[in-house]
Every structure is written in structure tokens, then in C-alpha cells.
Image (cartoon, rainbow, N blue to C red):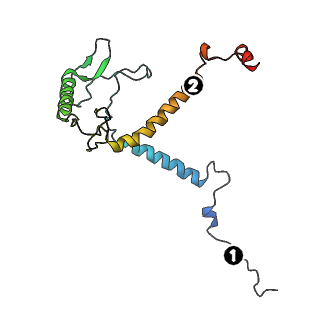
Amino acid sequence: MSNHSFQHRPPNPYAHEYQVQEDAPFEAHQILQVQCRQQKRIEAEAKPLKRAREYMPATNPLRPERTARTECIYSRSCKAELVVEENGTILSMCEEHKNYQASKLRERRAKMPARQFDPLQCQYLGGCKKERSIKLNGDRPWLCECHRECQNPSARARYRRSTSKKNRNARPHACHQVTIDALLPALF
């Protein structure tokens, strides 16, 4: 037998405060969840909503419940009428801002330098600076020797895949079909 005797604890005098009554419709954790949801809803309603920039057309046939846009999306202060195209589509900007944005895009594109190559330089898209090799007939291929070596196996594999797909799906031509009548004289 052990020396420890089983001792009973005295009853907790505060236990009734922590117990939920049996007839209560919700338990304590459910009440807290409801209170948290209500608090979040109140906070969300109090915050001012940011105006989202919309780049979709004013009327979307897939969303008929959406109301048509009435003001220019370029700036909030612009109250001009929206541009209507010849086919009846309403654009999202007024005439002034549409032209302004188009001119800015044209300027931005004009500033970008066109990709220019030295006639002897490798035409690899990564921007190789090596000189192109010379073919046996004197012409120059598009790529330098290094990139030609890299590209040839992948091009061959791509060609093999494409021809094998074609051959699998293709029926043999009538002149290539072998008939039993053609084989019989050769056997005897």
C-alpha cells in the first residue's frame, strides 16, 4: 500500500459563477462569437469606403444588375460626359482625358528606343554581343556559333515531335498502301 491517502478537495465556492445554466440558449463561447461579429460589422460600417478605380466598360452584359457609370474615372473632380463610341459602347473616360491619356502613352512609347542590331551581331533575344558565324556559302546565320549549337538540338526535337504527331494522325497515301495481291507474285 502506498503512504499517500486519497484526499478529497473541498468544493469550490465560486464554481457556480463559471458554470453556464442548462436552460441558457447559447454557451459562453457562442455569445462571444456573436458579440465579435457585431463589433466587426459596426467597425466596417464606420469606415469610409475607398472608391475603386474601374477599368471595365460601363455596361457589362454578363452583369445586368450593375448600373451604368456616369462620371469619368480619370479623376473624381471631372464631371464631363463619357465618350460614346459609334457602336454604342460607353467608354470610361471623357473626351479630354481619353485624348490626354492616349497622348501620354504615345510619348512613353516614343521614348523607348527601338531594338537595333549591328548587322554582324548575334540576333539572340537575350542580347548576345558576339559576332555571327559565317556559313559555307558565305551568308551569315541569325545566331552566333554558341547559340546555334544550343538551338539546334531543341529545334530538332521540336521538329521530331511535330512530325511524329502528323504521322500518327495521317493515313497512308493510296500509292504507299501495300496489298496482298502485290506481295503474292514475289512470294512464288
Q: Earlier in the sequence, mark 1 or mark 2?
A: 1
Instruction: Write down the residue under mark 2.
Output: 167
CA gap between label 1 and label 2 equals: 90 Å
Q: Which quadrant holds the C terminus? A: top right
Q: Which corner quadrant of the image does residue 180 belong to?
A: top right
Give residue 108's position: percent from left, percent from top: 19, 33
- Residue 12 is left or right of residue 104, and the answer is right
**Image height of 39 relative to 1, above or below:** above
Q: Nearer the viewer, residue 47 or 38?
A: 47
Q: Residue at x 63, y 66 (%)?
A: 15
Instruction: Write down the residue under mark 1.
Output: 10
> Is residue 79 in view from this perspective?
no
Q: Residue at x 27, y 29 (%)?
A: 73
Q: In the displayed orientation, state which residue is furthest to the right.
A: 1
Q: Which quadrant holds the N terminus? A: bottom right
Q: Nearer the viewer, residue 58 or 161?
A: 161
Q: Amino acid at mark 1?
A: Pro
Q: Which corner quadrant of the image does residue 111 belong to?
A: top left
Asked which secondary structure carries label 1, the reply is: loop
Q: Amino acid at mark 2?
A: Asn
Give residue 119's position: percent from left, percent from top: 22, 35
